Structures are given as structure tokens and as C-alpha cells.
Image (cartoon, helix red, strand yellow):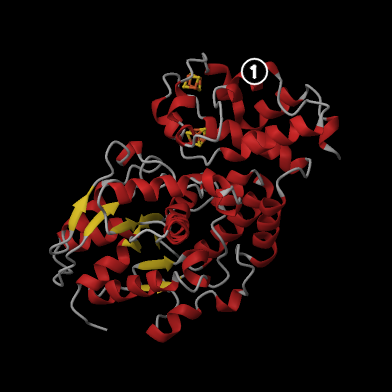
Amino acid sequence: MAIEIIDKEIRKSIIEHGAIDAYKCYQCGMCSGLCPWFLVSKVSFIVNRIPHNVKLGNVLVSEKPEVLEKEIEELMRCVGCDLCYEYCPRGVNISDIVRAIREILVEYQSLPKSLSDVVAKIYTSGNPQGAPEEKRNAWAEKYHVTYYTPDKEFAYFACCFLSYEPQLKKIAEATVKILNSAHISFGVTDAKLVCCVEAVRNIGAEKVFLELARNNINILNKTGVKKLLVSSPHCYTAYKNDYRGLGFNGAVIHITELFAELIANKKIYPTNPIPKRVIYHDPCTLGRQNNIYEAPRLILEAIPELYLIEFPNFNRQNSICCGAGGGGLWLDWPKDERLADIRVKQAYEAGAEIIAVACPYCFIMFEDSIKSMNLPLEVKDISELLQESLPETF
Ligand code: SF4
Ligand code: SF4
């Protein structure tokens, strides 16, 4: 069905898909000023128009293809970072409203091609890379990591990016080394466990999300997982929040929570100095959406000679998105319209030598920006920094 035939029934449909918050909005406009796109001078993204238009039923109704195209482009700007939600005086969840509209776009096959392609790839192969299932845990072989069995404490899921992207495997490897140093009993999750599908949900493909999420929950329950350890905040929020009510009752632990606890309980001792100025970027999904602000900082502060600096004005709940959320990882905005570039510039201006991250999406976005901006900065995951600081045990 072509998008042009959508009529004003759309309002009912969008509300039914989860945009009920639109009715709470009283058009103060704060969201438009808070949204990170406000920092991109070339882009005009008037966020408060979204709930307003939903209330009027004025969404995706134009007869003119160029108007629809522009509207869809605007809807793709939202990275689901929840900065507007954090401060909205009426508690309007714009991410939910945008997701509801995107679900309509999915139904009418009107998503940007790069997003429909990635959803299809995840659906058919289980990961956004389109890589084979049997290679999912190949990174763990050289460390002789075995599969999780119920006699082990933790099941570690390294996420699709750490499992398949060559430049990110080192993060999963560093994690294993740290866990071994602390004599933690763990195994990797079953190779049939696919992508957490958090991104799939935010893109708007709810049916694919539900099918794959249920499949993942069955595997975790069948293999007896009680404590799921994850490196990606996106996996964290999927299992902890998005899968709520779907049948997984185990605990979900982000790797920074465990590492901070191991340091506090003196199970590991960071001893090797890292004499660098390190700035920590709060990922939206770990910070604002899951309230984990302290654990990553406690880890970095425990590393000798590491000088931890903060983003002036834009840290903790005011952190701005790297641009990868809500499917942004697969949208190729022009060079002067990238949120990651703004963040990298902020880090550079704050005098950082290293941007420390705790999310593979942020890692990819910042690494790309640093290269293209040719700045003397490095991006490192907290797991890498912590492992470098531990005495060699492996
Ligand atoms: S901040 Fe909240 S109430 Fe104000 S315009 Fe935005 S969504 Fe509406
Ligand atoms: S969720 Fe983030 S990107 Fe989306 S409108 Fe709100 S502030 Fe902007």
C-alpha cells in the first residue's frame, strides 16, 4: 500500500500504537530547545510539532510526496535519547510518540531503505551484520570461554557489535580478561541468542521485535540463565525494560555495574597507571534511561594517574546522544549534520585525550567522527581501560 493514501484515521492509529502522551503536551516548546539537533545549525527540528500534529491528526496526510518525504526525514531525526522527556514539564515521551508513528511507516513500507534493510538482516540472520550464527562466539575461542551452564554465576552476552565487528572484539576480549582476573564464574550465552532487537523496536518494527524477543527469552529460560551480563546498554535496556512482561525474570547487569562492584570489593586492583586526560560520555541508554551514572566513573577514578574530566554542561542527565540511537546508526546524515561530531568537538575542547565510552554504538560513532575530523583523540571502552590497568594475568 502506498503512503499517499493514508488519511486522517492516522491519528487513531498512531494513538493506538502508543502515542497517547501527545494529549498531555501543552506546547511550551522546551523539547525543541533541549533536543540535541538544536545544536546543529543547519537542521531545524521543531520537536513540539510532533505531539501537536498527532493531536490534530495531521501526520503523514499530505498528498504531496515531497512534503511526506520531508516529514519522514524529520521523524528519522529523533534518536530516542529522552533528553526532552527528562525535562518535559508534562512528562511527554516523544520517543514513544515517534516510535508509534514509525510503526505506521513500517506497516506502509515507507521506512528509509537503510533501516528496512537492517531490520530484514536482523530478522533473517539474527544480527545487523548479516553474519552467520556459528561465528557469534568465535571471538571467545582463543580464551577458551565455554558456554553458560546453570552451575556458572553469569551468562555473558557480548552483543552483535562486539561479537562480529573486528574493531570491537577487543572490548569483549578485555571483558573476559577482567572476569578471569576476578575469578568470576561465567560462560557465554547460547549462539542462538540473537540481537537484543532494541534498535528494531525503536525503528518501529514492533512485530519483528516481539518475535525475536520471545525467541531470545525462550533460549535464556531453556538454558537456565539467572544473571545476564551485557556490555551494551542497548542489550541492557532491552532485557531489563523492553522485554518486561514477555517472560524473562532473570537479573540483567551492565558490565560497568559488575566492574565497579569488583573494584569496591577488592576483587580486582587497577594498578597500571594510565596518565591521560579521559572524558566520560554518558550513553543515553545507560544514563538517562537506566540511571547508571556512578559505576563507570568509579571504575575510571580507580585507575592510577587517570585524570577524569567531565563534559561542561552536557554530562550525566544532560549528556547528548552520539547520534546512533533510534536507528541513527544506519542513517547517513551529511557531514555537517552529525551529532557525534558535536560530541567529539566538545570532548576536544574540554582538553580530553581519550573519550571513554560504555556502549558499542557510541564507540562506532565517535571513532568515525574522530577520523573524519582528524582530531588528536582516541575512543576507548571502559573495559579496555580497566583491563589495561590490571596486572597481566592471562
Ligand atoms: S516540553 Fe513537553 S509539554 Fe513542552 S512542548 Fe515539548 S512535549 Fe509539549
Ligand atoms: S528523544 Fe532526543 S532526539 Fe528525540 S526529540 Fe527528544 S531530545 Fe530530540
Residue at the spot 72% in from the left edge and 51% down from the top edge: 113
Is residue 147 toward the left or the right of residue 309 in the image? right
Q: Is 154 located above or below residue 25 in the figure?
A: below
Determine whether the residue tagged by mark 1 lies in a helix, strand or loop. Answer: helix
Q: Mark 1 belongs to which amino acid?
A: Lys
* The N terminus sits in image quarter: top right
The image position of residue 120, as x and y in percent, is 70, 58
Q: Is residue 283 visible?
A: no
Which of these two is toward me, 374 or 379? Answer: 374
Q: Image point 68% across, 62% down: which residue?
A: 121
> In the rendered view, does 341 fall on the left or right side of 384?
right
Q: Nearer the viewer, residue 210 or 9?
A: 9
State the residue position of label 1.
55
Q: Residue at x 66, y 51 (%)?
A: 115
Residue 315, position as x, y percentages in the image = 30, 41
Task: Farthest residue to the front: give it.
Answer: 374
Answer with left or right where residue 203 lies relative to residue 320: right
How far across and how far down the image is residue 263, in percent? Answer: 18, 62
Can residue 199 be seen here? The reply is: yes
